[in-house]
Amino acid sequence: MVIKTAYSKKESVAEAVTEIKNSLNSSGVKMLMFFASAKYDPASISSKMASVFPGVNVIGCSTSGEIISGQMLKGSIVAMAFDNDIIEDIKVEIVTNLKEGVNTSKALASFEKYYGQKVSDLNYNKYLGFVLVDGLTCAEEELMDNIGNKTNVVFIGGSAGDDLKFAATQVYANGKVYNNAAVLALAKVKNGFDIIKTQSFRVMNKELVATKVDEKTREVIEFNHEPAAIAYSKALGVSVKELPEHFMHNPLGLMVDDEPFVRSPQAMAGNKVKFYCSIKEGMELSLLESMDIVEETAKDIEKKLAEIESASGMINFNCILRTLELENKGQCQKYADIFKKVPTIGFSTYGEQYVGHINQTATIAVFK
């Protein structure tokens, strides 16, 4: 079996799930991942997706828009099914109470017991982790640091959305619904995988150092020992009043090996600047300038596909800010067309996970 995808825009949960089940055929499925619009009742969508795929590891989350090969959707459910030829084995765990402090010890211990190896010893070329997080916890940084400190296995994923309501986001696992939690899934991949991290920015020759921050609220109080909004606007050459208009076009980037890991500003609170991603005190950040998302993403996808020669499927964790920009520029179909040739699902996230928590990025798992 090759990787199969399906989607439904049916209004009722029962009709939508039935359509997906009929499209995928449940025989031989080892793992199923789905992303569902926040319009669907969380308890119903999770329980019904699990019930129609008995014995299958089923995980998913709520979204702010869905992606499937050749289409960017709203108000739908998208799903991807994997069999033993792609995923040899998988173990799913839940990390709860994220807002009260992240502790992955129990989940990682469960992975170790299941696979018979320490997570620190697992072959990172054969094992791939997925992470789906309640997107309103503000705990993604701590979660990813917690995982990264204990294993070299890559965990990739996204923060659940709710169609920009910012009221409640859900993660799903094996028929249950979770808030204030993360779903972790550790998969043994048969034929290998690769990762694409793509963001569409050029680095400007201007730096801002976070000299005073509130990490818990993701607010920067001072850049370069000046009130954050004043220093930020000076670097851009605009007034403080105009600064929010530039947030999407000119976020900041933590540079790692000449590659930006994007930190996107969300709002101003007086002269403080609140971000969608935590910034640590003393962190040196580069000012970024947006480029063409479609062009840059297509280039990165083509480069990776040429390297691995063939891909059986992709999962695209695509930032909601990228989706909004694509919508504003009328480029949604052009973006969707990039993924026509390879079975793909994805969703518009409230943040992306890959070597930490980032923004205005697409983190993409590619299966060989």
Image: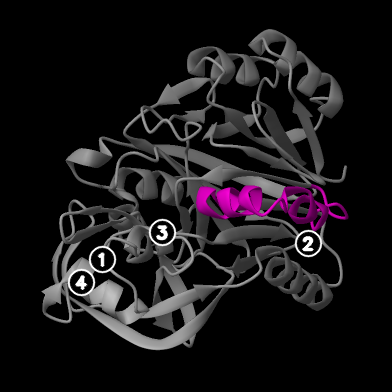
Whichever of callouts 3 and 1 sits on the residue coming sooner in the sequence is: 1
Q: Residues within 10 Å of mark 1 (few under 14, many from 20)?
A: some
The three-letter code of the residue at mark 2 reads: Lys
Q: Of 357 and 195, which appears nearest the observer? A: 357
Q: Which residues are magenta?
A: 316-343
Which x, y percent locates residue 155? 49, 57
Label 4 close to label 1 by CB (< 8 Å): yes
Which x, y percent locates residue 279? 26, 66
Cα separation, mark 1 vs mark 2, equals 48 Å
In this view of the protein, can residue 38 be seen by the observer?
A: yes
What residue is pinned by disc 2? 368
Whichever of callouts 4 and 2 sits on the residue coming sooner in the sequence is: 4
Cα separation, mark 2 vs mark 3, equals 41 Å
Which x, y percent locates residue 168? 38, 27
Q: Residues within 10 Å of mark 4 (few under 14, many from 20)?
A: some
Q: In the drawing, does residue 332 fall left or right of residue 226? A: right
What residue is pinned by disc 4? 230
